[in-house]
């Protein structure tokens, strides 16, 4: 099941490809992100290629046992290094098929949804990697030299990430009118799941953003009618990849070599606020999680309250209270 480098002729001419095109058009009309559509397109093309090799060119011919055989093929597939696909990678190939056949059934293109009752692998619940302490976050922020244009811009970006916990793509998509520094509010437009949300942004982050807007951004815009908040050296909206590289450089300068970049600030914001007593439902709203269970992972990395209980109740304390007389 090697990743196809280009669409094969048979799937391109099959009815399934025509239904696939209609499905992605339906998604685009309803505001699905181009990134989501592209990911689903790759996964469905891969299935169509597999089905075409077996003489199947109509979605009406696809059955649940057939999808179960494809699922087994995905499970048995080995990468170039001989390693199996992770559960997340397997789900990335199977969940788009569920979405596609669900659409086919709702549009009455198929009589029933053969993917409705597939038993998909369960993604293990792992803790966030690379949790930064408050001191480490401050050390990274301090690596940005505000006396230089690049340093001031980097500080404004990192302060925004840490204060709001928004994603890298959401930072890249910010427009000038999305940040209200007077009210301390930031609007995330078309975030994950194509949903908008309004989140608070702290006074310190606002102060750095204002400095960037006054001192740096006018020189980057060069009179262009560009509405993106953060501009690169060429006056264009920051590419998400460049944002990640920028953050990694400052992490490395602070002596931090943990995996991840922008997401480290997201994890840190959620964990630090929980440890300070924030209600998990408010953290859920800030992070833009649809389900509370997604946010609850941060309760498993927040140690402040657990350590306090441990210190107060565990019998192997360093200093024991004297017995009452």
Image (spheres, rainbow, N blue to C red):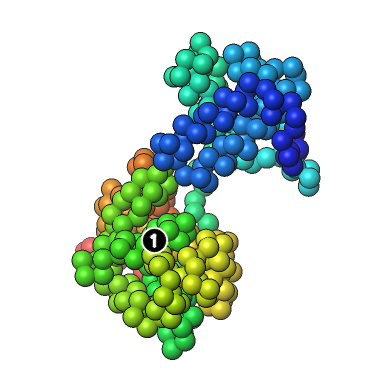
Is 113 situated above or below 287? above
Which residue bears the numbered disc 1?
174
Is 23 situated above or below 54? below
Question: In this orientation, which residue lies closer to the viewer: 270 or 206?
Answer: 206
Question: Residue drawn 26% across and 70% down?
Answer: 181
Q: Is residue 225 left or right of residue 240?
A: left
Question: Residue drawn 31% across and 51% down?
Answer: 197
Question: In this orientation, which residue lies closer to the viewer: 69 or 239?
Answer: 239
Q: Is residue 121 left or right of residue 84?
A: left
- As drawn, the residue found furthest toward the top would be 111
**Quarter where residue 87 is shown:** top right
Residue 308 in view:
no
Question: In this orientation, which residue lies closer to the viewer: 113 or 119?
Answer: 113
Question: Residue drawn 51% across and 29% down?
Answer: 23
Count all numbered tags in the image, as a single digit: 1
x then y, percent, for residue 319: 36, 69
- As drawn, the residue found furthest toward the bottom would be 147
Label 1 CA crowd tier, 10 Å (few <14, some 14–19, many 20+): many
Question: Residue drawn 35% across and 76% down?
Answer: 213
Is 104 situated above or below 275? above
Q: Quadrant of the N terminus?
A: top right
x then y, percent, for residue 207: 30, 77
Residue 4 in view:
yes
Q: Quadrant of the C terminus?
A: bottom left
Q: Secondary structure at mark 1?
A: loop
**Quarter where residue 260 is shown:** bottom right
Q: Is residue 163 left or right of residue 203?
A: right
Is 242 situated above or below 55? below
Question: In this orientation, which residue lies closer to the viewer: 58 or 152?
Answer: 58
x then y, percent, for residue 38: 57, 42
x then y, percent, for residue 69: 68, 21
């Amino acid at each position: 099941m090697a990743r196809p480098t280009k669409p094969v002729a048979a799937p391109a001419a099959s009815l399934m490809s025509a239904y696939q095109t209609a499905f992605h058009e339906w998604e685009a009309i309803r505001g699905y992100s181009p990134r989501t559509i592209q990911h689903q397109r790759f996964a469905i093309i891969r299935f169509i290629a597999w089905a075409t090799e077996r003489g199947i060119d109509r979605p009406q011919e696809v059955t649940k046992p057939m999808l179960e055989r494809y699922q087994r093929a995905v499970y048995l597939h080995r990468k170039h290094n001989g390693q199996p696909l992770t559960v997340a990678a397997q789900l990335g190939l199977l969940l788009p098929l569920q979405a596609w056949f669900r659409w086919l059934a709702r549009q009455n293109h198929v009589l029933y949804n053969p993917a409705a009752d597939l038993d998909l692998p369960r993604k293990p619940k792992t803790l966030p990697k690379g949790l930064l302490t408050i001191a480490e976050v401050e050390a990274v922020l301090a690596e940005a030299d505000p006396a230089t244009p690049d340093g001031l811009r980097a500080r404004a970006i990192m302060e925004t990430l840490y204060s709001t916990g928004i994603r890298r793509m959401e930072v890249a998509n910010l427009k000038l009118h999305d940040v209200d520094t007077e009210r301390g509010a930031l609007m995330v437009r078309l975030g994950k799941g194509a949903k908008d949300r309004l989140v608070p942004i702290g006074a310190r982050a606002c102060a750095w953003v204002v400095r960037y807007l006054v001192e740096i951004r006018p020189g980057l815009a060069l009179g262009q009618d560009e509405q993106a908040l953060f501009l690169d050296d060429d006056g264009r909206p920051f590419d998400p990849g460049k944002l990640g590289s920028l953050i990694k450089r400052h992490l490395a300068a602070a002596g931090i070599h943990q995996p991840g970049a922008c997401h480290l600030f997201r994890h840190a914001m959620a964990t630090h606020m929980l440890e300070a007593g924030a209600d998990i439902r408010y953290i859920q709203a800030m992070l833009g999680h649809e389900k509370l269970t997604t946010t609850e992972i941060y309760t498993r990395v927040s140690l402040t309250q657990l350590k306090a209980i441990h210190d107060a109740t565990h019998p192997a304390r360093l200093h024991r209270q004297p017995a009452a007389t």
